[in-house]
Image (spheres, rainbow, N blue to C red):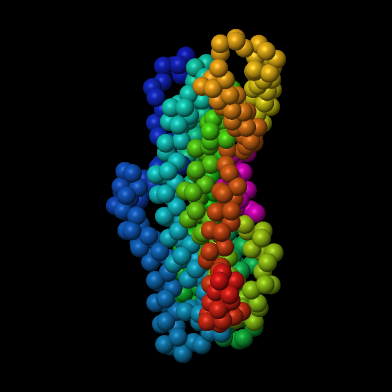
Amino acid sequence: MSADSLTPDDRRLPDPPDFSPFLGGPLFQLLRRTRLSGDAMELLHRRIVVIALVAWLPLLVLSTLASLQGYRAEVPFLADFAVHARFLLAMPLLIVAELVVHQRMRSVVSQFLERQLVPEGAMPRFHAAIASALKLRDSVFIEAALVALVYAVGVQVVWRHYTVPAAATWYVAPTAGGGGSRLSLAGVWYGYVSMPLFQFLLCRWYFRLFVWARFLWHVSRLDLRVQPLHPDRAGGLGFLGGTSDALGPFVAAHGALLAGMIANQIFHLGAALPDFRTEVLVTIVVLLCVTLGPLLVFAPQLARSRRTGSREYGTLAARYAREFDAKWLRGGAAADESLLGSGDIQSLADLGNSFEVVRTMRPVPFASRAVVQLAFTTLAPIVPLALTMMPLDELVKKLFGILF
């Protein structure tokens, strides 16, 4: 059902359910049947341990067996920082992020109703947007297509042709004649089990973010009751900015992936951390667009509400100021009316505060704090690599010198 296809039954829909981007879909049902998840995404630790071990432990075992048989790799498994960052940091963070997003975003729909942002006449379209999002979220075809995409493009094209190195590593061994290379047993598991599993989880994440963005876009098409005087400085939509906190583990997972790649370049190829300024900056910008970009669909309504509010409250303030001036400065007050104890000055101040709230209303439903917080969360896994440029004791001394 699309947001614009309405039936007479839409008007009799009950209050909408909690909308969770991750509580549904074929993978969620599979996790429930295998007792890796409860009805509300419980059993988090079990999911992390089982999924991470399926992706990482066989690589350790198979690469260790190969080394015991005499194979010496230029980059051994334990020294491949990118692999450990991917399967022991990024993958668990993506799994944690699913639960965090489920818990913090499922009340968003009810917030639209509790704050009476959706007019009565737009309620059928609001319900239709929810139904459309839930249908897309639970699509079996989409998740099957993601699996096919991972194996057809992620493995056969991207991984085999652009990621697998020419040098001998723990997962790539030279052929007997020395004219080429082949995947080791660890490489086969890495390329056809571990990497596809991780890529599927990541692609599924981006698909769910698309479902979330699409739902917000449909809601932004409604004529919402945005209030320019709302103290959240976002017309009453400030609760949407709080969803950025839930995406912290998601952006941290990308930071961990980038940190692993940079660590390999530093320790195995002699690169330096400053060489990756562009990659770090691009990663931060892309993640900000992915996480906060969907909220920009409300910018036109917020900007329009601020313009309208500034005009209306400005007119009201001008009228009150003229009457205050005529009463207290031009002799309009009664002779027996005392200025002391009068509420006129306080009312003028209150009106000024109200006008200031309208004037400083943000055109987006999130504050600059959300941008800074997400940027620092992305950088957090990369910060320890600063130790490759400076010993820890010297770094601590410089920090103390700056602070004190």
Going 48% across and 62% down the picture, which residue do you hit? 90
Specify whether residue 11 is painted magenta.
no
Quarter of the picture containing the C terminus is: bottom right
Going 70% across and 15% down the picture, which residue do you hit? 330
Viewer can see residue 162: yes
- In the displayed structure image, the side of residue 282 where residue 112 appears, left or right: left
Q: Is residue 179 above or below residue 278?
A: below
- In the displayed structure image, the side of residue 142 where residue 180 appears, left or right: right
Q: Is residue 366 above or below residue 281?
A: above
**x and y percent of residue 158 in the render?**
62, 62
Identify the residue at the far front of this view. Answer: 336
Q: Main secondary structure of the magenta part?
A: helix
**x and y percent of residue 346 in the render?**
55, 25
Count of numbered circles in the view: 0
* Residue 316 figure quarter: top right
Q: Nearer the viewer, residue 274 or 50?
A: 274
Identify the residue at the far bottom of this view. Answer: 70
**x and y percent of residue 103 in the render?**
39, 44
Q: Nearer the viewer, residue 289 or 42?
A: 289
Going 56% across and 59% down the picture, which residue do you hit? 376
- In the displayed structure image, the side of residue 108 where residue 151 appears, left or right: right
- In the displayed structure image, the side of residue 319 where residue 202 appears, left or right: left
Viewer can see residue 194: no
Q: Which residues are magenta?
A: 285-297
Q: Is residue 384 above or below residue 122?
A: below
Q: Nearer the viewer, residue 120 or 143?
A: 120
Specify whether residue 290 is painted magenta.
yes
